Amino acid sequence: PKKITSICCIGAGYVGGPTMAVMAQKNPDIKVTVVDLNKQRIADWNDSDLSKLPIFEPGLDQVVAEARGRNLFFSTNVDDAIREADMIFISVNTPTKTYGSGKGMAADLKYIELCARQIAQIATTDKIVVEKSTLPVKTAQAIKSILDHTGNGVKFQILSNPEFLAEGTAMTDLANPDRVLIGGEQTEEGLKAIQSLVDVYATWIPKAQILTTNIWSSELSKLVANAFLAQRVSSINAISELCEASGANVEEVAKAIGMDSRIGPKFLKASVGFGGSCFQKDILNLVYISKSLGLTEVADYWEQVIIMNNHQRDRFANNIVSTLYNTVSGKKIAFLGWAFKKDTNDTRESAAIYVADKLIDEQAQISVYDPKVTAVQMQADLNYLNTRSEAENENFVKTETDAYKALEGAHAIAVLTEWDEFKTYNWQRIYESMSKPAFVFDGRNVLDKTALEAIGFRVKAIGK
Ligand code: NAI
């Protein structure tokens, strides 16, 4: 197999940035260049002030500090990076289609196709092209057919190497992954390409954790992994509603079932619902693929995971309204958290956006504090839903950079993200500053319900 000396990664986002930073850190003899069309993003990756990196992940700044300028580079010059590389990772976004056939379900592959065409046009030497983005099964075939028709004799091998990192713990996930998955053509050339990529990972990952498969298994495994993870969240969330109706406590139930080694304790936390750029998009994609293949029951089975998640978000918002005497019009509702989970500034598909949207419909005045998300981002998230005018969103949602200020005078607090710092607040002081009765809706079950009730709060947690 060819020894890789130069890597290019197209897409400097939540996956491309951290993944390549670690790959460069662990392979000082490989030159790694991460490119993006977004000039601001690249400028931020190159900022000498490491607190300005475009992505917040605990530990990312140190790895960037170690490798950047040594063998890790961020650039907007996509063509040069493609030309120079022996291996090209495609790590661009693959959002759900918002138009045409498959709208609202299928993955939009236009960014992927543009990358493939650009590689086809620029490359003058043989390349290994690696799908890092999450892609529908058989996408490699489409990429291959674009690359194989350049007519200039350049040879391409296509690998699938889906990323399993979780935002918020990306750096430890990348340093110690449960497994790395590499799919490729089962031909002599294909197997050689697989081995080249195995060698890149093997500098820090034990061989036993590097799985190699055929390309379709690899592509499908990523969709299936996300579907199974999301399914656990929707399963426990379904039970949380049953707990609330029956007097059981979902945390006790989760512990009791999680100690069964066949079930296991992880990913059984009831909440206001999962968010993030991947779970919903990847399940919709799985549903779409199943439908396209005529597998109606398979499609319906997985679609239910999304339906349950939407229901959980709606239920949380409705519960706030009904508890506040059926009206929140003109009332101040304070949000703790906007990111889709703790330790990230990523807000894509965050439950907070949907809960806010429902409460704005009810004319609530929302004030938000999140330690890592900017006001501009919050407004952009709401505007993206297209429910009302930008001016109205601005009117109804105010962002505070001080948590106590956000909570002051509120009729109710809604915890939307499980940031650790929320537990350490002076809840007595918060209680005194609020309208009474002071309600707390803990959408993440992170606060101490008993302690808050002792102060005087009326607390509604999930599944209790
Ligand atoms: P992102 O949106 O943060 O980053 C994608 C970047 O690609 C953007 O900066 C965009 O400007 C750039 N880009 C798009 N087209 C381009 C082109 N033609 N040339 C150069 N740059 C281009 O997306 P993110 O979150 O990094 O996701 C990327 C892929 O990884 C998706 O397929 C996603 O499903 C997958 N994934 C994401 C995970 C996550 O936790 N965010 C985890 C595992 C997989």
Image (cartoon, rainbow, N blue to C red):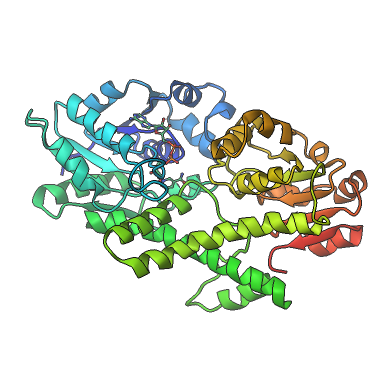
Along the line of sight, which residue is nearer the eye, 339 or 26? Answer: 339
Instruction: Classify 93 as above or below 71.
Output: below
Residue at screen point 34% across, 66% down: 296
The image shows a total of numbered marks equal to 0
Provide residue 70's location: percent of width, then percent of height: 39, 26
Quarter of the picture containing the C terminus is bottom right
Along the line of sight, which residue is nearer the eye, 41 or 409? Answer: 409
Quarter of the picture containing the N terminus is top left
Q: Does residue 351 appear to the left or right of 409 in the view shown?
A: left
Along the line of sight, which residue is nearer the eye, 389 or 87? Answer: 389
Among the 4 quarters of the image, the one containing residue 12: top left
Instruction: Classify 459 as above or below 354.
Output: below
Where does ligand 1 appear, by image quarter? top left
Provide residue 235's location: percent of width, then percent of height: 54, 68
Residue at screen point 91% across, 57% down: 455
Residue at screen point 44% across, 21% down: 39
Among the 4 quarters of the image, the one containing residue 297: bottom left
Q: Does residue 136 appear to the left or right of 248 in the view shown?
A: left
Residue at screen point 33% across, 20% down: 77
Whether residue 160 can be seen here:
yes
Whether residue 58 can be seen here:
no
Provide residue 286's location: percent of width, then percent of height: 36, 57
